[in-house]
Amino acid sequence: MSAGAVSAAVLDDLLREDVDKSVVDAVVVLPALYVPEACQWLSTTAGRVALEGYSWMQAVHWVAGSGLYKPRRHRSHGPRSFGPTTVRVAQELARLFPCRPGIEYLVRRTGLSERTVEYHLGMLREAGLLAYVVRGTRIRGEAAQASEFARMIPVEFDEALGVRTVQRDETAPEYTRAVCGIAEAGRELMAKLAAKAARKIRKPRSKSGSKTSGKRSRKGAQQGVVTGVSGEARCTPMQVGTSAVSSAGTTFPPPEDKLASGEAKSPTPKKSTKPAGGRRKQNKVGRRYQLGRELVQELDWLRGCPVPRVSWVARDVADAGWTVTDVRAWLHMRGEVTQVRRGSGLLAVLLAGAETVLDTPAKRAEAIEQWRGAQEAARRHRIEQVRARTERYDGDWTGPTSRAVRREVEAAFAQVREAATGGRRQETGDVADGQALAPEPSEQELAELRAAAAGELMGGETTLIRSLDPETALRVFGARLMARADQLDACSRSSLMTYGHR
């Protein structure tokens, strides 16, 4: 097939009309249109940003009619072609600013299923018509965040129609280039694309006479109702119309004869019975799920448990009007847990009969006060422990508190003094001012003390060294034995090591 014949086939499929031979010859035959996943971001795209939805819809209709993008070339499932359904989804995206649609919003507006909407959004990205600005997130326990897109015009569109672009700011990214002209051969085609972009594609109505159409209509009613398409711009965050025309200007009063007969309703709008916040009152299932979600977030041993299962376990207390604070107070009364194998099963055991024991709000309030008092007492106890530990290890060293250890230390010093005096015990009594109570130990005595301390260190004991103040111990035993004693003390405070005798 020649190049002119292929170009003519592409244009016939695009416009469904006869086109002049000059236009056919001017259009370039383009390769298959496909954008890989790595290039579907605004920072990596090769296209340019569409300044408004009207020009973007021209590119959408061009891709839909050109046949350059075929979904089944790149995936084995999903839609078979870029057709009217994809254009209808794109039509909803063109009305949003910023383009941050939620899946539920598109399902509600188009009447399609959630999976179908996801398929067509992926097709728009693969065709180069959408690019991620921020990708949405789905985190358990938190609200889902919708993805934000930038409406893009592919490079193939500019090449096919002869659109000329220029980069006005050299420091700006490539996707900000603006249109500065169009070739004569592409003007007629651009005008026909503009006429298509101005039309609104609606969901086709099915005939009510056939059984198949009845099934389809019921299925569409279950999936969602397609709302009317208006010409007003829609803001994504608030999801309300921003038209500057007042709706009161298009309201016409009924004729007087119908008012007199009572057939027409009063033009005065009725007062809304909905709550001021705009949300419906939470039902029984909603309260169960809310309590289950809060329990998973508050209790550490329930982290990772599925919220529906926890909601089902706590259904009785949720139906009784309990809050997460009431549940935590009841769990405190039942006792703290140290080892949990299955969080939801343990919760079911602990909550058994709770709604019958604390059956009044007064009882639950009393349990909450007890739980908060226990929390405050535990907090003060932790503060005292930290303070005592800080004073013990960071302050001045004090003698051993055990009487047995003190007796052993005194006996050791008595032996040293006895050896220094030749085996004679010193008489205790009053001494003159300035006279030492005990003579300084000799080198032999110091050597014996160091040997005894080294023997204790080999057995994991630091009693002899810690019986003296740090300065005296450093002078008597030396830096090496002191460092070894510090290491043993540090290891003894760790839960991963144990010292003792066999």
Image: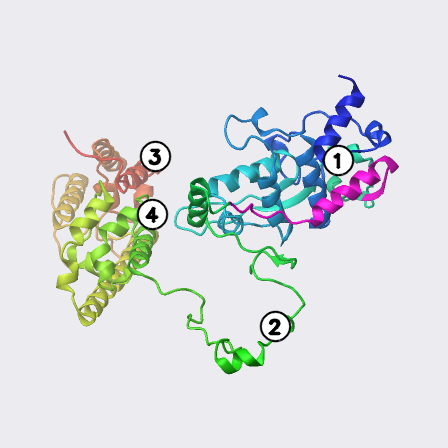
Residue 450, horizontal then vertical, whole percent: 26, 35
- Label 1 vs label 2: CA separation? 41 Å
Q: Earlier in the sequence, mark 2 or mark 3?
A: 2
- The disc at residue 251 is 2
Mark 4 or mark 3, whichever is nearer to me: 3
Residue 477, horizontal then vertical, whole percent: 30, 38
Residue 326 vs 468, above or below: the answer is below
Q: Which amino acid lies under the numbered mark 1 shown in the image of this protein?
A: Glu
- Dot 1: element: loop
- Dot 3: element: helix
Chain part drawn in magenta? 179-206
Position of the C terminus by quadrant? top left
Reply yes or no: does residue 400 show up in magenta: no
Residue carrying label 4: 471
Q: Earlier in the sequence, mark 1 or mark 4?
A: 1
- Label 2 vs label 3: CA separation? 98 Å
Reply yes or no: does residue 193 show up in magenta: yes
Q: Earlier in the sequence, mark 1 or mark 2?
A: 1
Q: Residue at x 84, y 29 (%)?
A: 21
Residue carrying label 3: 480
